[in-house]
Image (tube, coloured by chain):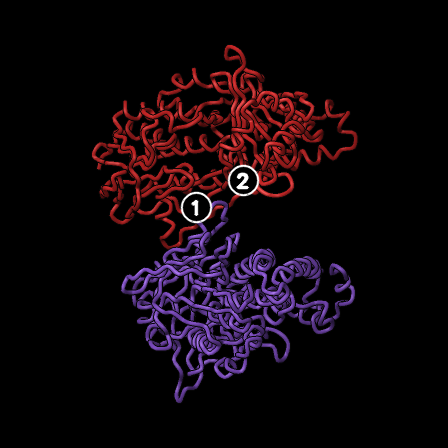
Chain colours: A purple, B red
Amino acid sequence: MTAHSKHIAIVGAGLVGSLLAIYLRKRGYKVSLFERRADMRKNMLQAGRSINLALSNRGIRALEEVGLADAIRPVAIPMHGRMMHDVKGNLTFQAYGKEGQYINSVSRSNLNIVLMNKAEAEGATLHFNQRVTQIDTDKTTIAVTSPENHLEIHTFDLIIGADGAFSAIRQSLQATDRFDFSQAYIAHGYKELHIPAGTAGAFQLEKNALHIWPRQSYMMIALPNPDGSFTCTLFFPFDGETSFTALSSDHAIKDFFNANFPDAAKLMPSLLRDFYQNPTSSLVTMKCFPWVKNKTLLIGDAAHAIVPFYGQGMNAGFEDCRILNILLGKYHDQWETVLPEFQNLRKPDTDAIAQLALDNFIEMRDLVGDADFLLRKKIEAKLHSAYPDRWIPLYSMVTFNDNIRYSEAYSISRSQKKIMDEVMSRPGIETTWESLDLASIIQRLPNG
Amino acid sequence: MTAHSKHIAIVGAGLVGSLLAIYLRKRGYKVSLFERRADMRKNMLQAGRSINLALSNRGIRALEEVGLADAIRPVAIPMHGRMMHDVKGNLTFQAYGKEGQYINSVSRSNLNIVLMNKAEAEGATLHFNQRVTQIDTDKTTIAVTSPENHLEIHTFDLIIGADGAFSAIRQSLQATDRFDFSQAYIAHGYKELHIPAGTAGAFQLEKNALHIWPRQSYMMIALPNPDGSFTCTLFFPFDGETSFTALSSDHAIKDFFNANFPDAAKLMPSLLRDFYQNPTSSLVTMKCFPWVKNKTLLIGDAAHAIVPFYGQGMNAGFEDCRILNILLGKYHDQWETVLPEFQNLRKPDTDAIAQLALDNFIEMRDLVGDADFLLRKKIEAKLHSAYPDRWIPLYSMVTFNDNIRYSEAYSISRSQKKIMDEVMSRPGIETTWESLDLASIIQRLPNG
């Protein structure tokens, strides 16, 4: 069967589903997208306040491949590093990488609209308000329920579940024998808050940075929006002495923010309203295997949902699409070969980024203010500068490199950590670090 | 509210549900059990061929507490150790513990019947053919569907899900926010086979042993039944060169058994029929947390399903009931206090036995034939004999001791392993082991 005669259903017209539709249309497949929600292009209210995501090299590479890099650039705000805010409001800037390397603050809904428009322009059919309630992996059918409760059964050559962390497609697979699955919540939840633009749309904090208020056991971050505002996110324990549960009155909330985020609190006129009205959301890591059952495939968050602390959730999902497209090319669209290879190739990578994302929460909320940690970063920057291809810091491997697999980055970072632990244990390293014998350090890398 | 005025629903009248009903009746609660299946006492055919379980001290202690030890003894067959069968049919016996220590082969259905009869005798109400399709943890209601599809909603003071590894109650909890859950299958499945009794009900293998045919990557075991037969279980990879998938013809099955289990194959006249007719079942570890939501509790396999290789699944579930009963006594039936304490106390223990059960598969199928492993066991037996309270082998802590928590046993075994690794690394240990300085080894234990 040639690509042109195959009809593929993608469940979920979110970021990953829409991008995948574009890739598959470009290969010549007939593509139908089924989306549970209404068309956000016709009803922007429903999409709610724009929530921003960090778009980095892995995601950008996929957007470039489908010809969307130029469409995204005008609405992306470069963030060159972390701007740390201490409790007195003092600022410290830490570049993410080398000169010219940055991540991008983009609006989820804007990006989704660009992707949906492109998918339609390429010839994909989008069906909104269609809830997929059941699938049959033997017959490759999906049962779709409309808002009027009309149930229709559609048959396809392939079903792809791109329906996110709480995927209905994955739930169908979960009921089959020998399907491994885990969902693990962390003790912290998050709540979105708001810093409005200043006069004439001015940014009230440094525009080109990701702002962090690290407070050891919790943190707040802020990402810039094109209108001059910032979306803040408080990552905070659900329960305990310092927790969402404990912040239950105007007084408690105000006192807490004034004491711990004084510089931000001044810029948050709607703090109380936002705090009460915006939901407290939970943070979960979801893993499963297999991702494939007969001719049904899970992709993106449906296959591997991660916590947001490495800013890689969307990037990993976009990379899924790119890798799937490469395999389709390599194996001439033979899905029987592509599907098992895809899941076996990607599973270790998405497991690795899941772990790195959990680890990075500790780094962001706790270590970024730590002297030992900052010295490590300086030494690593020196190593990277002297040996740009031999010593690439973990953050750069994950964020600015799209040729190193997540699982490789993870494994290399383990070797780097062992070496750096020894270097940091040298007496007087705080004063001698600038005269380290870098060559001897590099030689200790595996294949050094 | 006193115990006497509280009405508790137990979902599942299996081993754990029935035992718990007895405990709770003895405390004075009104208890209703809802069982999806028919009453196996009236329809033994449905219960199928008797499947046997290993009952050991933790389980026996609970049965003693509810006054059932005497009822069980006549139908339990003591197994004093492992009888290993090599490929030539040579036998090696390894005692499980000291003289007089043994585990028991009991029939699941016989034991269940004893427990259901006792629950009824104590005043619990048993409802069969009642499928619990939904629960409401806010209102403490369960929706029960009869075979005639009558749906009834019942309200209780407390709901306890004892409905096994694929618990419907757990599925309801799983849909709530921040519920951690994992299901992990191993690459092996299992199939039950049969060695009939010999003439006049004679046992054709040693009666008082658990038989093992360890073959590194797979194994077969056999447990005695009161009628002189043995139930064999083949634990075998699903896929690959040597696997269930590969054994797909009369020829392949016969050749495989003759080559690898020649002594057993001779005693299995119905091998081919059993192999084709009996299902190939999968093996899963299920974990979740919390076990409590408002006034709904998960217990036994519904909270923690484990693989069968330590023979502790039922014993752990019975211990759950015993510990819950202790806490109810300690806190004067204040469930608000008991429920959170119960889950916090038991979770590390059931996680520990889950890991031990996975580890023991490797020991059973691979190590039990290994010279290094057998020497370790001999040295440990010497240590245990000289210091019976200071060095208790892991198997004995888990199986013959009911005062050491699973989590303690796990942690002690880690210390023992470190010490034994060093002892085993001593040059010439194979010849010098009988003259080891045992006191110096004992001193190296934590708190030694």
| Residue lying at the far top of the rendered structure | B200
Q: Is residue A341 above or below residue B251?
A: below
Amino acid, disc 1: Cys
Q: Mark 1 points at which residue?
A: B288
Gap in angstroms between the C-alphas marked 1 and 2: 14 Å
| Residue A93 seen from this side | no
Total labels: the figure holds 2
Residue located 64% across and 37% down the image:
B217
Q: In terms of sequence position, does the residue under pointer 1 or pointer 2 come before the other? A: 1
Percent across and percent down for residue A157 are: 48, 61
Residue located 59% across and 35% down the image:
B249
Compared across the picture, whether A89 is left or right of B126 comes to right
Percent across and percent down for residue B374 are: 68, 27
Q: Name the residue under label 2.
A: B355
Using the rendered view, name the quadrant where residue B415 is placed.
Answer: top right
Percent across and percent down for residue A286 are: 48, 56
Q: In which quarter of the image is the N terminus of chain A?
A: bottom right
| Residue A104 seen from this side | yes
Q: What is the crowding at mark 2: few (fewer than 14 residues within 10 Å), some, or many (at least 20)?
A: some
Q: Quadrant of the C terminus of chain A?
A: bottom right
* Subunit bearing disc 1: B
Amino acid, disc 2: Gln
Near-viewer residue (A183 or A242): A183
Q: Is mark 2 on a helix, strand or loop?
A: helix
Compared across the picture, whether A391 is left or right of B337 comes to right
Q: Tell me whether circle 1 and circle 2 mark residues in contact (CB < 8 Å).
A: no
Whether labels 1 and 2 share one chain: yes
Q: What is the crowding at mark 1: few (fewer than 14 residues within 10 Å), some, or many (at least 20)?
A: many
| Residue lying at the far bottom of the rendered structure | A200
* Subunit bearing disc 2: B
Near-viewer residue (A45 or A162): A162
